[in-house]
Image: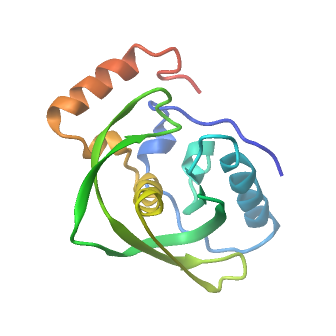
Amino acid sequence: MAKRDIRYFGDPVLKSPADPITTFDDSTRALVDDLLDTVQAPGRAGLAAPQIGVGARAFSYNVDGDLGYVLNPEIVEVSDEKHEVMEGCLSLPGLSFPTVRAVRATVKGVDLRNEPVIVSGEGLMAQCLQHEVDHLDGYLYIDRLDSEHRRQALRQARSQDWFWSR
């Protein structure tokens, strides 16, 4: 178990779809432990495996005291109702932009025993679920921004010390 370093925008692992988890062994347990340890730092709501350099379909969450993880998650339901929220990302530290997200979301996946897991939520939890599954599909929240905000985000990212660093 360890708190892992975060990969930043520009690292190719963040733009590659994550591979499904097919073995549920000690290495998978170690990944989950690292995801849970790393997401517990102050100000963190979610963390996808690619953000710590692992191209596996797994994420952890820490929202309003609810700490957990999902392996092989897929979004199975989102509300028709959308809202614009200020969103940031550990892989783009210091930046946040208005992002349109569904108000409610449900993710289905499995746990370390390959047993079904369903996580649903509204507000911040729904935002977290959508954000982390986006990471696993090879997308960052800036990919969802309107063109003007995306230009601003890219301009600001390029000026940061962490840009393209590993």
Identify the image quadrant of the C terminus. top right
Q: Quadrant of residue 110?
A: bottom right
Colouring method of the image? rainbow
Q: In the image shown, does 36 or 12 lie closer to the viewer?
A: 36
133 to the left or right of 26: left
155 to the left or right of 134: left
Q: Position of residue 96 (x, y in %)?
A: 38, 33
Q: In the image shown, does 43 or 114 lie closer to the viewer?
A: 43
Q: Where is residue 46 in the image (x, y as percent from the top left)?
A: 56, 52
Q: Is residue 20 above or below residue 36?
A: below
Q: Is residue 45 above or below residue 60?
A: above
Q: Position of residue 50 (x, y in %)?
A: 55, 48
Q: In the image shown, does 95 or 22 lie closer to the viewer?
A: 95
Residue at 59% of width from left, 53% of height from top? Answer: 49
Q: Residue placed farthest to the bottom in the image?
A: 115
The number of numbered badges drawn on the structure is: 0
Q: Where is residue 37 in the image (x, y as percent from the top left)?
A: 75, 50
155 to the left or right of 4: left
166 to the left or right of 123: right
Residue at 63% of width from left, 66% of height from top? Answer: 69
Residue at 70% of width from left, 49% of height from top? Answer: 40
Q: Is residue 96 above or below residue 160?
A: below
Residue at 47% of width from left, 21% of height from top? Answer: 163
